[in-house]
Amino acid sequence: MSTFYRSQVPLIIASLLAAFMIVEFFLDWAVLRTISSDIQSWGVVISAFALGLGVVTLTRNNVGIIRRREKNWPYYLWCLIIMFTMIGSGLIGPLGKHPVFLWLYNNAFIHLSSTMYSILAFFITTAAVRAFRARNIDAALVLVSGVFVIMTLAPIGATIWSGIPLIGQWFLDVPNMAGMRGIIIGIGLGVLTLGIRTILGYERAHLAGSGGEK
Amino acid sequence: MLLIIAVSWPLLFPIGLPVPVSKSTRMAFDTIEKLPSGSLVAVSSVLSGGNWPDLGPPEMALVQHLFKKKMKIVFIGCVDETPTIRESTLLPRINKYDAQIGVDYVNLGFIAGAPDVAEAAFATSLRKVLTVDFRGKPLDELPIMKGVNTLADFKLVIHIGMAEDPVRQYYTPFKIPLIVGVYGMMGPHYIPYLEAGQLSGMIVGLRGAAEYEYLVGFVGEGLMGSDALSITHLLVAICIIAGNLAFLYTTRGGAKKEGTK
């Protein structure tokens, strides 16, 4: 495929669509609204296809690893077995409600997912102990405010001392909000810049492997 | 090991610590209380097995309140797991007060493109991206969906997940009240949206769910997990303080030793 079709055509499509969506947001015209609504529906269709593409890519990669007997290949095989069992049982009628699918989902998938999420508690605890270390005045301030906010966010804080939630809430409402507003405004300006660069064709990272930044 | 004990002990032997209600939770409760019965409410979510411990209880508490107030509820999922987890885990645990499916509530399933694309499509072109509900029934045959075409037809929208994308896709174009249920760690991040009036209420993780359950008068996972949350937070605070005392002791001890040399 020539460079024109691989990079220029997607760039033109992305720029035109992005520019159209911005114009539509500011002009309240029925025709533009209808076209914009259609474009958003295309987004949903493309996203749905991406799920299927993900299955194909994962299968191809895993089959390659299993064939070559690479390190930990049985895990890749197990991944494929589980994935196709879930897909297969989910597709058998009634769609998504087959007893095998629901049994696997309710008794295995939910608990495994929750376990993965819960493991974060151990990392967060050790990370908090390491991060909140009063090495200097700045770190000491972070430590004090952090402890007050932690105890404010837990119902037990008010039981220990009624002043904890008052001080903690002040930290949340004043310094935290000021900092967060700054971050949000900064992100907004960054996104705006990125959008303008994308529309003008200077930003090419979204073209995945066909050029990067100009 | 201490953390495992701190989590499991209060779950097995509840202490019953008081749950003070925060401003953001009270705002969410008051917003729903002010709505007349029978109002159409959209509940969009990114609920999944992984985030259930933090996002499941807020959604459960809010939906319980909606059913109690006899609202008409339209559920939509922005990730593939959401409709299944609602059907298998959330809805069976809730007292639906004789609400009829298709008339008082409906699970529309999932729209691909999490989260912004799905939310934008649901808000602006619902009928184009969905023709049947999660059970395969055509939307045109559902009494609850009669005359519902865009988010403008709803009186309130609740989103469980993050807060930036629903502010962008729901609140900004339609200006209808928006309540969010967010991860516990993300609560402080979204206070500016609350103070700016873009959010009509915010339930922050398990703790927010406990507060909301207390207000609604329903004992769910929030209140049951509230003691465990308190004890684990206390443990983290104690660990931080103990770690700093040890740090001070070792650094000062080191300095003294160097001084004596």
Image (cartoon, grey):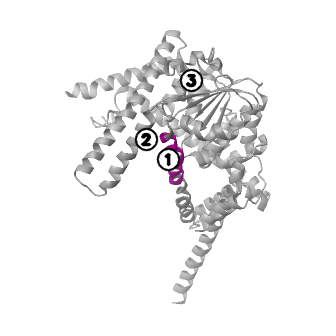
Q: Nearer the viewer, residue A110 or A42?
A: A110
Q: Callout 2: residue from which chain? A: A
Q: Would you say residue B163 is visible in this rendering?
A: no
Q: Are marks 3 and 1 in contact (CB under 8 Å)?
A: no
Furthest residue in direction left, as rendered = A2
Q: Is residue A204 above or below residue A171?
A: above
Looking at the picture, do discs 2 and 1 lie on one chain? yes
Pointer 1 local density, CA inside 10 Å: few below 14, some 14–19, many at least 20: some
Q: Are marks 2 and 1 in contact (CB under 8 Å)?
A: yes
Q: Amino acid at mark 3?
A: Ala
> Which region shows up in magenta?
A100-116
Q: Which quadrant of the rendered structure holds the N terminus of chain B?
A: bottom right
Q: Name the residue that disc number 3 marks.
A: B123
Q: Is residue B105 left or right of residue B211?
A: left
Left or right: A73 with respect to B214? left
Q: Residue at x 31, y 42 (%)?
A: A59
Q: Are marks 3 and 1 on the same chain?
A: no
What residue sits right under mark 1 in the picture? A109
